[in-house]
Amino acid sequence: MTQEEALTILKTGANVFLTGEPGAGKTHTINQYVRYLREHKIDVAITASTGIAATHIGGITIHSWSGIGIKNSLSKYDIDAIASREYITKRISRARVLIIDEVSMLASNMIDMVDAVCRAVKDSPEPFGGLQVILVGDFFQLPPVNRTSQATSFAYDALAWREANPIVCYISEQHRQDDTPFLELLSAIRSNSFDAIHIEHLEKRRTSEHAAPQNIPKLFSHNVDVDRVNTDILNKIPGEAKLFTMRAKGAKALVASLQKGCLSPERLSLKIGAAVMFTKNNQKEHFVNGTLGTVQGFSKLDGHPIVKTKEGRKIDVEEMDWGVEDNGRVLASITQLPLRLAWAITVHKSQGISLDLA
C-alpha cells in the first residue's frame, strides 16, 4: 500500500493500524492526516508510547494524555477519579481522533486502560468512547518494556484492540534507504529468511574495534553506560567545557515529559573536539536527527558551537524548540541546542534516527 492509499483510508474515519517497515513513511503519513484534520477544524489528540517518540510527532505520551500515568491497572474508583479531573475531561471530550505512535512498545493492559478512560469520559460504550483511533507502529521493532517475569503481552492482545477492529494499512514504500543490499538484509531479518549471503554482506561491513574510525557512536542498552562513556571521553579532552542549559516554560508535568523525551540533555557540556549528534531535523541548515559531527569552535558573536559534519559542512548551531500543542495552542516548550554528545547512545534513543556510522 502507498502512503496516499493509507491517507485515503484514514480520511474515511475508520479505525486504522498504520504499519510498515522502517523508512516507509508512517510518521509522514500521520503528519499529512493531522494537517488535513486541522484544516477541517477536527480536534486530534497526538500521543505516543514514549516521550522520545512523542517529541518526533509533536505530541505527548499516551500515559499523560489519558491521565493514567504510571498505573498498571485501573479500578472503577481509579477510572472515576481520572474522569473527574477537569483538564482530562476537557481534553478527551474535545478530541474526535486519537493517534498513538510507537504502539508496539505498549502492553495490552495499557490499551485497555486508555479505552476504559475514554469510554468513561465520553459516556459511550463504543471502543475508545467513539473516537477514531489510529494505532501507528511496527511489531517487528521494539517490544513493550517488561519489568516482570511474565510473558510480554502486546498491544494487539488487548480486548479494546479487537473491539476497535482497526483496518491494517501496511505501507510498502521505502523513503529512508536506497541501498538495495542493505534493504534486502533488513527485510531478511524481518521475515526470518536470513541466510549465508546476508552473513557475508554483514561480514564485509564489520571491522575490529582497534581499526574502527574515531568518534563514532557506540550503542548501549543502558543510560548509565552511555553517560559514563560520554563523560569520560569529554573529560580527557583538554580545555574548559562550555555549558548550555535548557530553558523551559509551561505546565510542569508537560515540561518534564518533553525533557524526558528530548535527545538533547538539560545540561549540555561541550569542548572543541567533542563528537556530537544533531537531535532534530532542520531543512534550512541541512541536518537531520542523527547527523554526526565534531565541535570545531564557538561563535564569537553568540557563543554557540560551530559543528563540522562528516560531510565537511560547517554549521553555526542555533537553539531550537520542542513543544506540546493542543488545538494550536502551545501548552509547554523547551529550548536547547539540537545537539548531544555522540560517543555513545542507547539503542532505544537511536530509534527513528539515521546514523552515518555506529
Image: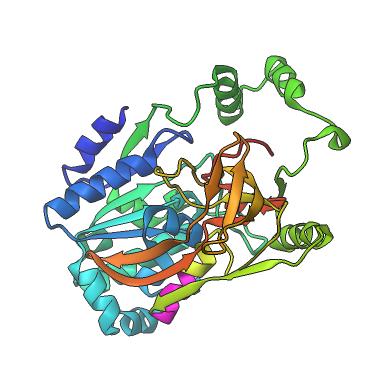
**On the picture, is 309 further left or further right than 286?**
right
**On the picture, is 319 further left or further right than 238?**
left
Residue drawn at 34 percent across, 43 percent down: 17
Q: Is residue 253 magenta?
A: yes
- Residue 235 position by quadrant: bottom right
Toward the top, the furthest residue is 197
Q: Position of residue 206 (x, y in %)?
A: 77, 28
Image: magenta residue range:
251-257
Q: Is residue 321 magenta?
A: no
Residue drawn at 78 percent across, 63 percent down: 239
Toward the left, the furthest residue is 40
Q: Main secondary structure of the magenta part?
A: helix
Q: Position of residue 234 (x, y in %)?
A: 77, 59
Residue drawn at 25 percent across, 31 percent down: 4
Q: Quadrant of the N terminus?
A: top left
Depth check, front residue: 88 or 124: 88
**On the picture, is 212 further left or further right than 145?**
right
Q: Quadrant of the C terminus?
A: top right
Depth check, front residue: 81 or 273: 273
Q: Is residue 61 at all visible to an observer of this figure?
A: no
- The correct choice, above or below, for 167 with respect to 125 in the image is above
- The correct choice, above or below, for 119 with respect to 145 in the image is below
Q: Position of residue 62 (x, y in %)?
A: 40, 64
Q: Position of residue 186 (x, y in %)?
A: 58, 28
Depth check, front residue: 254 or 322: 322
